[in-house]
Image (cartoon, rainbow, N blue to C red):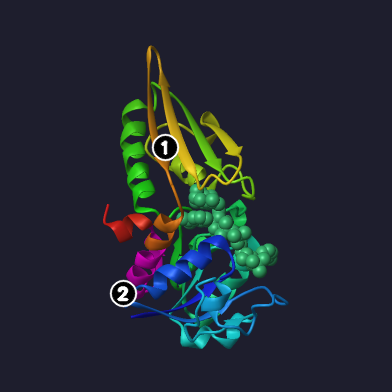
């Protein structure tokens, strides 16, 4: 059983994680965290997340009030909040699953370094299928890296704050790790239109032929399911830097 705190329960993604976690018997939600001043602070997290019922755990605006009761904090919110959560998790030696995207290189480094002290995962995409796509991409990059012009297109909702998406950048990093390509050799294109749940397409353009590897999310439950599996995996392991590949066993 893993005891968790979920940040930003009113948010699209963390609301879905509340719902997915409530459906499992290996995860217990002990509380939530929201920005100070919101009308759902002090209320039950089930109501804050739009579940329509109480689940017996409150939302706080100060993580230190609840941190002792959890094993791990899960956070898919905003960069500023994620960095605050990181410092509390380090101080209290609690696990941190961070699904937020849009960090600076320096912030990214600090998040990854936390794996030396606590159970830590920073995953721009917790979908199983996207992580299998990433693996396939590595194979393709190894074979075609010096033959193809590689372009990555990400499509998301017009409300998304960051571009390219965190996933597009991670897919790019996989290509650079498995070929001689550098990030600046890859062309990134971001479309932000309507309420698209998220699509990623990687194009390998060769002479006289081309290959595409794509993923389309029809809703966001795939990310919430993967996040729940990641939390359980992290709770079963000690301090360390984990990836979705570890969780899936790729
Ligand atoms: N790793 C993955 O698989 C996935 C990652 N993501 C990432 O998750 C993050 C959240 O996405 P999404 O759920 O769409 O975002 P939303 O805009 O729906 O939710 C963000 C939440 O953060 C809260 N919040 C906390 N601190 C602040 C602050 N300082 N300013 C404003 N809001 C704050 C907001 O509270 P309030 O509601 O009270 O305003 C809001 O509920 C993004 O970075 C996105 O890229 C998304 C999908 C999958
Ligand atoms: O819709 C989003 O926002 C998403 N963000 C993550 C990202 O930046 O890659 C994961 C997914 O693409 C959805």
Mark nearer the N terminus (2 vs 1): 1
Q: Is mark 1 within 8 Å of ligand 2?
A: no
Position of 65 with respect to 139 (left or right) is right
User: To which residue does mark 2 refer?
Assistant: 236
User: To which residue does mark 1 refer?
Assistant: 175
Crowding near the residue tagged with mark 2, few <14, some 14–19, many ≥20 C-alpha atoms within 10 Å: few
Which residue: 43% across, 28% down?
203
Which residue: 58% across, 37% down?
190
Secondary structure beneath label 1: helix
* Residue 187 at least partly seen: yes
Q: Of residues 206 and 106, which is closer to you in this image? A: 206
Q: Is residue 86 magenta?
A: no
Specify the quadrant that holds the N terminus: bottom left
Q: Is residue 240 magenta?
A: yes
Give me the C-alpha separation between circle 2 and circle 1. 30 Å
Q: Is mark 2 within 8 Å of ligand 1?
A: no
Position of 166 with respect to 175 (left or right) is right
Q: Residue furthest front?
A: 52
What numbered label is drawn on residue 188?
none
Which residue: 56% across, 72% down?
7
Instruction: Examine the residues drawn in magenta and state their main secondary structure.
Output: helix
Q: Residue furthest left?
A: 249
Looking at the rendering, which quadrant does residue 201 occupy?
top left
* Residue 108 at least partly seen: no
- Please provide the residue range marked out in magenta: 226-243
């Amino acid at each position: 059983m893993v005891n968790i705190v979920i940040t930003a329960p009113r948010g699209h993604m963390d609301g879905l994680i509340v719902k997915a976690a409530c459906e499992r018997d290996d995860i217990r939600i002990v509380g939530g965290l929201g920005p100070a001043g919101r009308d759902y602070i002090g209320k039950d997290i089930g109501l804050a997340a739009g579940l329509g019922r109480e689940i017996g755990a409150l939302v706080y605006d100060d993580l230190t009030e609840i941190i002792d009761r959890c094993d791990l904090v899960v956070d898919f919110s905003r960069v500023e909040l994620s960095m605050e959560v990181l410092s509390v998790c380090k101080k209290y030696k609690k696990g941190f699953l961070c699904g937020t995207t849009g960090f600076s290189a320096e912030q990214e480094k600090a998040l990854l370094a936390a794996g030396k002290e606590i159970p830590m995962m920073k995953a721009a995409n917790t979908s199983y299928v996207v992580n299998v796509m990433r693996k396939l991409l590595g194979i393709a990059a190894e074979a075609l890296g010096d033959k193809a012009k590689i372009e990555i297109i990400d499509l998301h909702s017009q409300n998304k704050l960051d571009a390219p998406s965190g996933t597009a950048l991670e897919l790019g990093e996989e290509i650079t790790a498995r070929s001689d390509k550098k990030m600046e050799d890859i062309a990134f294109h971001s479309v932000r239109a309507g309420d698209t749940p998220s699509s990623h397409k990687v194009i390998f353009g060769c002479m006289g032929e081309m290959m595409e590897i794509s993923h389309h999310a029809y809703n966001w439950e795939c990310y919430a399911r993967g996040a729940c599996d990641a939390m359980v995996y992290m709770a079963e392991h000690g301090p360390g830097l984990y990836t979705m590949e570890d969780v899936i066993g790729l």
